[in-house]
Image (cartoon, rainbow, N blue to C red):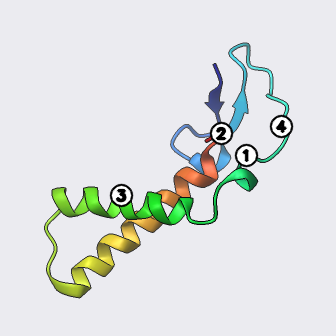
């Protein structure tokens, strides 16, 4: 089990992986390089589909706003993630 601990629990940019005892986890490689090139796009597309079911939107402008939200959300999760 790996916990994420940061200086400010609400600030995902400061998170770093730690073991349950509080010791830093040794990074043996970046898991991101193993992702297929279209993986992130597929994830963003799934997020957009979920947002479309739960948030009202209208026309192309509304769809573009949902896409912006999905891209920002995926980027935050991708950046903060310690593994896939």
Q: Residue 51 location, x and y as percent?
A: 26, 60
Indicate which label's residue lies in the foreground, 1 or 4.
Answer: 1
Label 2–label 1 contact, CB within 8 A = yes
Name the residue tied to disc 3: 47
Q: Is residue 75 left or right of residue 44?
A: right
Q: Secondary structure at mark 3?
A: helix
Disc 3 or 4, which lies upstream in sequence? 4
Which quarter of the image is occupied by the C terminus?
top right
2 or 1: tag closer to the N-terminus: 1
Q: Say whether disc 2 or disc 4 marks the residue closer to the N-terminus.
A: 4
Residue under circle 2?
A: 83
What residue is drawn where x is 16% and y is 73%? Answer: 57
User: Helix, strand or loop at disc 4?
Assistant: loop
Q: Which mark is residue 27?
A: 4
For this orientation, the residue located farthest to the bottom is: 60
Q: Nearer the viewer, mark 3 or mark 4?
A: 3
Q: CA distance from mark 2 to mark 3?
A: 19 Å
Q: Position of residue 48 (x, y in %)?
A: 32, 64
Q: Are marks 2 and 3 in contact (CB under 8 Å)?
A: no
Q: CA distance from mark 2 to mark 4?
A: 10 Å
Chain-order first, disc 2 or disc 3: 3
Give the Cα separation between the discs numbered 1 and 4.
Answer: 10 Å
Q: Relative to 4, is 15 above or below? A: below
Q: Which residue is drawn at the image coordinates 63% and 19% (left, top)?
A: 1
Q: Give residue 71's position: percent from left, percent from top.
A: 46, 67
Q: Is the residue marked by circle 3 packed among few (<14), some (14-19), or many (20+) residues within 10 Å?
A: some
- Front-most of residues 18 and 74: 74
């Amino acid at each position: 089990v790996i916990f994420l601990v940061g200086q400010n629990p609400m600030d995902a940019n400061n998170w770093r992986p730690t073991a349950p005892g509080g010791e830093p986890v040794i990074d043996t490689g970046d898991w991101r390089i193993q992702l297929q090139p279209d993986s992130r796009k597929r994830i963003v597309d799934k997020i957009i589909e979920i947002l479309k079911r739960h948030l009202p939107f209208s026309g192309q402008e509304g769809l573009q706003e949902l896409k912006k939200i999905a891209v920002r959300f995926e980027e935050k999760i991708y950046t903060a993630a310690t593994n896939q």
